[in-house]
Structure formats: structure tokens, C-alpha cells
Image (tube, grey):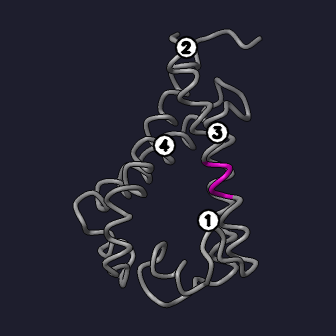
Amino acid sequence: MSEWSTAGSRVAAVTLLGIAGVHVAWGRGSSFPFATVEEMHDAVIGRPVSPSPSSCYAVAGLLTVAAAATAGLPSRRSRLRKLAVLGTATVLATRAGFGLSGRTDALVPGSASPRFRRLDRRIYSPLCLALALGSLMSLREQSRPVA
């Protein structure tokens, strides 16, 4: 097992957990890391509408499960963990593909502001692809003995 693979899955797990935390903050009404809610809408959502707090919390919950699975929980050899990691990688890779092709609005209707599209192609979609790969790297660690 390469150190790069281990580091990649650890970085992916921590990043997924961090993004979950940001979604919790958004569910509580924060515009972090933007100055205003309107600026956040334009940059992150691509339209002037806030998702409901429950939607933000649901995404945060799914990201937390993805982070835990990528980190090797409940156990490295668990079939449930493998399914969660494969699901995570599939969703993130799909999101990346649509974003990189400029078609996120096909998944999330209305996500079409010019700022969102630019950030989606430059930051969000490549990040989703990197997180998908990082999640998959954690599956390669299954055969490694747990210390």
C-alpha cells in the first residue's frame, strides 16, 4: 500500500467532513465563507434561492457518512462500508462529470448563474472528482492489516 493512497483517502475523509460542517452552517443560516447570503447563492447554488435547512442537514448527514466510510468505519472489511464508499464515489464522479461538461443544471435545475458555472468548472467539479478518487483509494486499504 502506497503512502500516497493512504494520504489521499485521509485527505478525502477530512475534506468530506469539513464540507459537511459547512452544510450544517448553511442550514443554520450562515453565508460562510461569503459576506452575504445573496453572494453565497450566486457562487454556490447558481440561483437566488436557499435550500431548506432540512436539505442542508440531509446533505451534511450524507457527507458525514461518506467521510466515515472513507475513513474506514465501521470496519475496513465491512460490506456496508464498501457499499457506502462505492456510492460516494459514484455520486461524486457523476456530479463532477456533469459539472465539468457545464451541465450541472441538468442535475440541479436553475444552477445557471455565470459565476456558479465558472466556479463549478474550476473548483467544485474537480474537487468532486478528487474526492471520488480519494474515497476509492480507501478501498485499496482493505487488505492492509488494521493496527
For the magenta stretch, what is the residue range?
16-20
Numbered circle sitting on residue 69: 3
Single out the residue that lies furthest toward the left: 101
Residue 103 on the magenta segment? no
Q: Who comes first in sequence, dot 2 or dot 3?
A: 2
Distance Cα–Cα, label 4 vs label 2: 17 Å
Q: Quadrant of residue 119?
A: bottom left
Closer to the observer: label 2 or label 3?
A: 2
Distance Cα–Cα, label 1 vs label 3: 15 Å
The amino acid at mark 1 is Val
Q: Who comes first in sequence, dot 4 or dot 2?
A: 2
Q: Quadrant of residue 84?
A: top right
Distance Cα–Cα, label 1 vs label 2: 30 Å
* Whether label 1 touches label 3, CB < 8 Å: no
Single out the residue that lies furthest toward the bottom: 48
Q: Residue at x 66, y 33 (%)?
A: 71
The amino acid at mark 4 is Leu
Q: Who comes first in sequence, dot 1 or dot 2?
A: 2
Quadrant assignment for the C terminus: top right
Q: Who comes first in sequence, dot 4 or dot 1?
A: 1
Distance Cα–Cα, label 2 vs label 3: 19 Å
* Whether label 4 touches label 3, CB < 8 Å: no
The answer to whether 27 appears left or right of 101 in the picture is: right
Please determine whether, in this image, residue 144 is positioned above or below residue 48.
Answer: above
Q: Residue at x 38, y 58 (%)?
A: 95
Q: Who comes first in sequence, dot 4 or dot 3?
A: 3
Q: Please identify the dominant SS of the magenta region.
A: helix
Q: Residue at x 45, y 44 (%)?
A: 89
- How many neighbours does mark 4 have within 10 angstroms: few (below 14), some (14-19), or many (20 or more)? many
To which residue does mark 4 refer?
Answer: 131
Residue 18, percent from left and from top: 67, 52
